Structures are given as C-alpha cells and as structure tokens.
Amino acid sequence: MTPVRHLPAPGLHNCRDLGGYAAEGGVTRFGVFLRSEAPCGLPPAGIDFLRRWGLGEAIDLRGEAEIAWRPSALEGVLPYRKISLSGGAETFEKQNLPQGPFSWDKVYIKRAREHADWIRAVVTACAEAEGSVLFHCTTGKDRTGIISCCLLGAVGVSREDIAADYCLSMVYLQEMFEGMRTGTLTIRKEPSHFEPYVFETPFTAMAAFYDFFTDEYGGIPAYLRQIGVSDEALTRLRNKFVAPNP
C-alpha cells in the first residue's frame, strides 16, 4: 500500500501511521507503528484492510473493564496483547492534580511520574516486536498520545511535530465524540457525562508534556533510560523505526 499518514481503515476514524516525521539522522519509517482508537466492532473489511496493510501485532492499553465492555475485534485474529494502564478509560483523579485550570499535560505528567512501569513495558514491547504494531486505548488520544510522544521522542522527532501529531485526534475523532456526547456510543458500562475538555487535544498540552521530559530529565531518551528501558531496546527501536538519511 502507498504510505499515508491517516489510514482509511473501515471502522476506524483515528488510525494513523507514525511514519514520515523528520528524526535524528533520518525520517521515521511508514509501516512500523500505528496509533488508533479501540478497534471494537470492526467490519470484516476493516480487519482485511489491516491484514493487507501488514499489521503484525496489536497492543491494547485499556483496562480490563473497558476491554470487557468493548472487546477488541483483533483479539484472536492477529497477535494481541494487553498492557493496561490502571485507572480506567481516559480517566484520572482530578482532585490529585495541581490546582488551577484543567489541562491535559497535568494528566500526562502525572502518569509519566506514577506509571513509569507501564510506559517502560509498552515502549519495550514496541521496540522488541518483530513486525508492525498498532497500539490503542479507547479514543486513541490520551494513553495512546503518551506512548506516541515517547516513541517519536525516543528517535529525535521534534517537539512541534510530536504536538502536531497529537492535535490530529481532535480532527479525526469528531464522529466518535458526537456518539459519546449523545449517548449513542457508550465507552464504559457506567453512564457517563463528559466535560468539554475530554474532546480536546490542544497543541499546548502535548508541547508542555514534551517540555516536562526536557526540563526534568534532559529529554525523552534520558527519561526512558531512567525508567528502565534498556539501551538495547532503544537501539532496536531506532533501527526499526528510522530510515537513515542517504
């Protein structure tokens, strides 16, 4: 298939390839990492599309309750594993965040500090995978955005490109968001009311998250090493993800 950023996979709105970004010493390869919302209820054409695209493995970042409520259509069809972030669907304990107006970067920074084991496990799994990987949460913007930031940042993709990639979710998820607003799509068993910020992916949030790594660790590669991602895994990630400059 022709390399494209936004994949027209039937049944998915927010399926995007992380290829094509300038990285340190080269450019990220297409066909290595996909990010998306949860592939639940995919039609046969959607599964066939991903197979023909060459998908090798799916990593589900959702919690057990989310998966039980909306099972992945890829489980049992393609290699599939769960590396769950505790805490539930795109949620957080708001009262434990710093005081002041809500912003997503506070959530992501809290997760990077308190769930380093989860980030280490997902990044290592992505690095060690033999083939291409689709990783996803529920909407494909928050937990998925954290992992995308770490994968792209690990190979030297710029702050601006990482934040711009994050922003795209707010564009592609409009149909899913409308279903969540109106109740025609229920992403969890319990009735839900969503604050407006749930449907936002502002540039400033991901830029501030990137700055957190720079300010406190000296960059994303240094953070990943500190939390236990091995040099071997980072080298493997670079070799599979970055096409060197000629």
Image (spheres, helix red, strand yellow):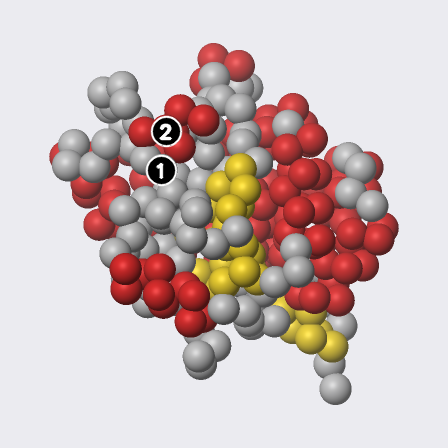
Quarter of the image for residue 188 reads: top left
Q: Are marks 2 and 1 in contact (CB under 8 Å)?
A: yes
- SS for dot 2: helix
Residue farthest to the top? 95
Residue at 50% in and 63% down: 55
Quadrant the N terminus occupies: bottom left
For residue 128, above or below residue 75: below
Residue at 47% in and 13% down: 95
- The foreground one among 155 and 40 is 40
Query: What residue did someone put label 1 on?
Result: 71
For residue 165, above or below residue 25: above
Could you tell me the amino acid type at mark 1?
Pro
Left or right, 137 with respect to 83, comes to left
Q: Residue 113 in the image: x percent, y percent? A: 67, 27
Query: What residue did someone put label 2 on?
Result: 68
Left or right, 89 with respect to 195, comes to right
Q: Residue 129 in the image: x percent, y percent? A: 66, 55
Q: Residue 180 in the image: x percent, y percent? A: 22, 36
